[in-house]
Amino acid sequence: MKFFIDTANLDEIKKAASFGFLDGVTTNPSLMAKEGLSRQDDHIKAICALTPGPVSAEVLATETEAMIKEGRHLASLAPNVAVKLPLTMEGLAATGVLAGDGIRVNLTLVFSPLQALLAAKAGAAFVSPFVGRLDDVGHDGLELVEEIITIYGNYNFGTEIIVASIRSPQHVLRSAILGADIATIPYKVIQQLAGHPLTDRGVADFLADHAKVADK
Ligand code: E4P
């Protein structure tokens, strides 16, 4: 299972890389805005220099021709850019063209298994089902991931599933049990994955026991 970090914050990306298991990065316009950025070119280049893995950079255009133009531009910024497009009819049409250029496309804002089926047929390298946003409206987001895994397995599609909109360690755990290819995880949740109160207590106990004999 690959771990991407879902952020546009350079410090968070550097810290995640230092843990040794950073396989890629996903950004979106909201994450860019959180960093105070309206133009993303230099920032995307900076992120791409921090990891050899795919870095998803999202287009702002909503019409096919404009998406293709913006996608080609984003892909020219660094060899590891993956162009992120919304799963709309326009996005699907742009995916075929960009994939034909050899550009990896991540189809995002996916909320149904049929959207994911279309993503694979369009030639997307990645598909991003948003589990947290589905949970927010009373669905089980991980059920969507399970359905996509079944459909892709039925036809041996090569499109990799990025579980997105992750809010908790449970989302990561269930994604791993299902066998999802990738989880894109906010930094806060990456920290939660490692933490356990019994680990903290165990370290404290070991140090306390050692201190009792340290001077002897
Ligand atoms: C994925 O690529 C998106 O950037 C992200 O996971 C969206 O998450 P959110 O629903 O927390 O905004």
Image (cartoon, helix red, strand yellow):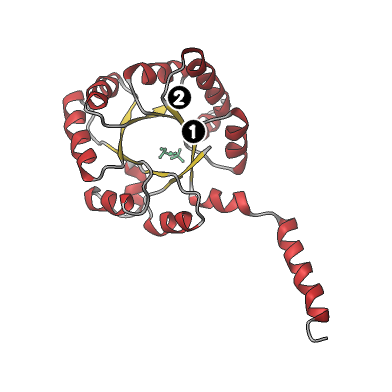
**Where 96 sits versus 33, above or below?**
above
Looking at the image, do the residues carrying marks 2 and 1 touch, with CB atoms under 8 Å apart? yes
Q: Secondary structure at mark 1?
A: helix
**Residue at the bottom extreme of this rendering:** 215
- Residue 83 visible? The answer is yes
* Residue 111 marker: 2
Q: Is residue 199 left or right of residue 69?
A: right
Give residue 148's position: percent from left, percent from top: 50, 21
Q: Quadrant of the C terminus?
A: bottom right
Q: Residue at x 23, y 27 (%)?
A: 98
- Residue 138 visible? The answer is no
Q: Quadrant of residue 50?
A: bottom left
In front of the other: 153 or 38:
153
Give residue 188's position: percent from left, percent from top: 53, 52
Q: Mark 2 belongs to which amino acid?
A: Phe
- Measure how far apart labels 2 and 1 are at the Cα level: 9 Å
Q: Is mark 1 within 8 Å of ligand 1?
A: yes
Q: Residue at x 55, y 31 (%)?
A: 135
**Number of residues whose C-alpha sits closer than 10 Å to that of mark 1, classed few (under 14), some (14–19) or many (20 or more):** some
Q: Mark 1 belongs to which amino acid?
A: Arg
